Amino acid sequence: MRGLRRRNSAVNVDLLLHLILCVAPCLVSSITVNTPAELHASKGDTITLSCTFTSTSRPTSKMSVDWSYKPQSGGPPQSFFHFSSRAFPSLEGQFAGRIQWSGIPARGEASISLINATLKDNGTYTCSVRNPPDVHGSPNSHIVLTVTPKALSIRFSDVAVLLCFILLPSTIITLILIGRMFCPKKQHSQSNTYRSPIEVTEGEQYNINPPEAKEQKVSCCDLWLMDPDSEEEYYNIKKKPVMDEGYAESQC
């Protein structure tokens, strides 16, 4: 009986040790880091590389955050940012002066901001968080960043230039053409046509015109909308010398 009890005790101890070994890692390896899988941005933008973590232990001064970058063309990862109680951004390389710490460890945030993104920044970014005693689990997470050229945008000043130098002159020319098409042509009076001497009346012989036959004044609008042939005829009439009454009587 004593031998059986000893064996049972040994089995219970072994089971207890196995249980402790299985449960203990779960108690200290509960840290988890999360980031978006992909991120898209335009050249010149300020990008927030978001990183959050959960841990069973409260963040202390021993907590640390590391960010590394692997180029899209390949190559080993390059560490460019470290946080431990305070931020230590890289002072040289392509990220020098372009990284800002925007994390709040007490809230489980370990994000950074990338200023003035360039096409060379395309690649994979890794966020690593350590918070002892939580040293196991999933302390790393990756973001694939894609930076594209910024699309062309038309500013208001560009539109104003187009309106002033292209659309406005085109509109004015169109209105002039429409006016010439729909404005009625001036009818030529019979006094301007050629008549034989027999048809000349007595009053016309002495250059005595009836009141209704007086020349009408032409406005600027009529001149603007006048056909080329009418314009030439109008200016020819203007150039002719006016015959006075004394000269007409002498001819008789």
Image (tube, helix red, strand yellow):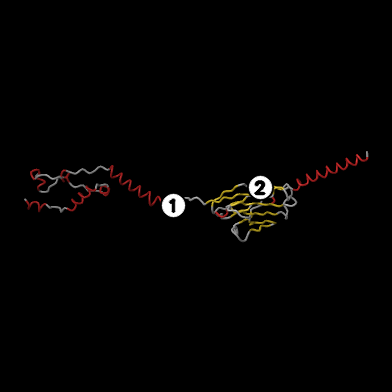
Q: Earlier in the sequence, mark 2 or mark 1?
A: 2
The number of discs equals 2
Residue 219: image x %, image y %? Answer: 25, 48
Q: Residues within 10 Å of mark 1 (few under 14, many from 20)?
A: few
Quarter containing the N terminus? top right
Residue 217: image x %, image y %? Answer: 22, 48
Q: Name which quarter of the figure residue 200 lies in.
A: top left
Query: Residue at (27%, 47%) from the top-left corner?
Result: 225
Residue 177: image x %, image y %? Answer: 30, 45
Res 103 label: none
Mark 2 or mark 1, whichever is nearer to me: 2
Q: Assign a secondary structure to mark 1.
A: helix
Q: Choose between 227 and 7: the one closer to the eye.
A: 7
Q: Decide: marks 2, 1 in contact (CB < 8 A)?
A: no
Res 158 label: 1
Res 34 label: 2
Asked if residue 75 shows in the view, the reply is yes
